[in-house]
Image (cartoon, helix red, strand yellow):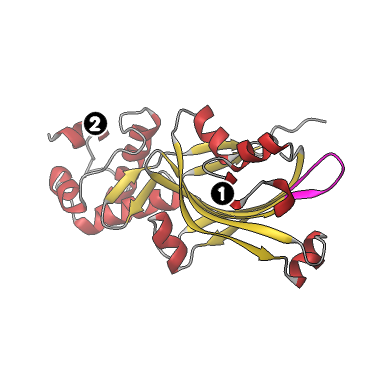
Amino acid sequence: MAPFAESVGPLDETAREPLYKQLQGKLRKAIEENKLLPDELLPGERDIAAEFTISRITVRKALEGLVKEGLLTRRQGAGTFVSNRVEKNFSQLTSFSEDMVARGFTPRSEWLEKKVSKVTPEEIMNFGLSPGMNIYRFHRLRFADNSPMSIEYTIVPAFCLPSINAVTSSLYVALGETGFRPVRALQRLRAILFNEEQAGLLQTTENAAGLLVERRGFLEDGRIVEIARSYYRGDTYDFVAELST
């Protein structure tokens, strides 16, 4: 038996359970028991089919089910990988960089756009910003190690930073240095499907499941200092919150 099949375990052609279901179960168990490690590349469908002596259609159906569960992820042009999920505590006000470092990842960003502009009428109405205010717009693709995790669109009032170039890596570090790091925030999370552009940036497929997190960060005096929309890959990020009575 080939190495991959050995780590997953054999299928039983005499069993009543369909072969694709058996393969799904074996793969799921192998992932849970760390026989298949996070971010590990799986063999191609043809190779898996040959190792288990089953059809490629059976393999594809099994893998598609695990992709929908978020246990596997497909990267265009690279193959199918075991998901490397990150757990985010939804009740703590921390930055993306802080979350990644706390979990042993190296955070980095690719700038999509950063510019100075005037606040729009819609932003005045929706966020209570002052007419004529200068704001900084930061659009970034965020990574954990080399895996794209989210697309982030952030608005910060210009009075919070000495210049738009003050943000080099972590926005919260830059805001902390000027005394304008938010102390509380309102967050909203909802499920979305990625469009073609978003899917391309996040190395996933169009209409793949994602999470949109909208955050408004405030100072103690109630001034808003951060307005963010972050699109997270649904197969790599879990949001948790501790509740009590």
Q: Are marks 1 and 2 in contact (CB under 8 Å)?
A: no
Nearer to me, 111 or 27: 111
Residue 75 picture location, percent across and down: 33, 53
Q: Which residue is mark 2?
A: 7
Is 127 in front, or is 48?
Answer: 127
Q: How many marks?
A: 2
Which quadrant of the rendered structure holds the C terminus? top right
Q: Is residue 220 magenta?
A: yes
Q: Nearer the viewer, residue 20 or 50?
A: 50
Q: Amino acid at mark 1?
A: Asn
Q: Which quarter of the figure has residue 181?
A: top right
> Vertically, is 44 above or below 105?
below
148 or 97: nearer the viewer: 97
* First along the sequence among labels 1 and 2: 2
Residue holding disc 1:
165
Q: What's the residue at 41%, 43% (across, down)?
A: 71
Give the left or right position of residue 11, taking residue 194 as reference. left
Q: Is residue 174 magenta?
A: no
Residue 177 in percent (x, y) is at 67, 35
Does any portion of residue 107 appear in the rendered image? Answer: yes
Residue at x 76%, y 62% (from the top left corner): 133
For residue 3, the mark is none
**Which residue ends up furthest to the bottom in the rendered image?**
121
Horizontal side of residue 167 vs 242, given as left or right:
left
Q: Evaluate whether residue 93 shows in this view.
A: no
Q: Amino acid at mark 2?
A: Ser
User: In the image, what residue occupies the spot 80% across and 42% down?
Assistant: 219
Q: Which residues are magenta?
A: 217-225
- Residue 83 location, quadrant: top left
Residue at position x 57%, y 33% in the image: 98
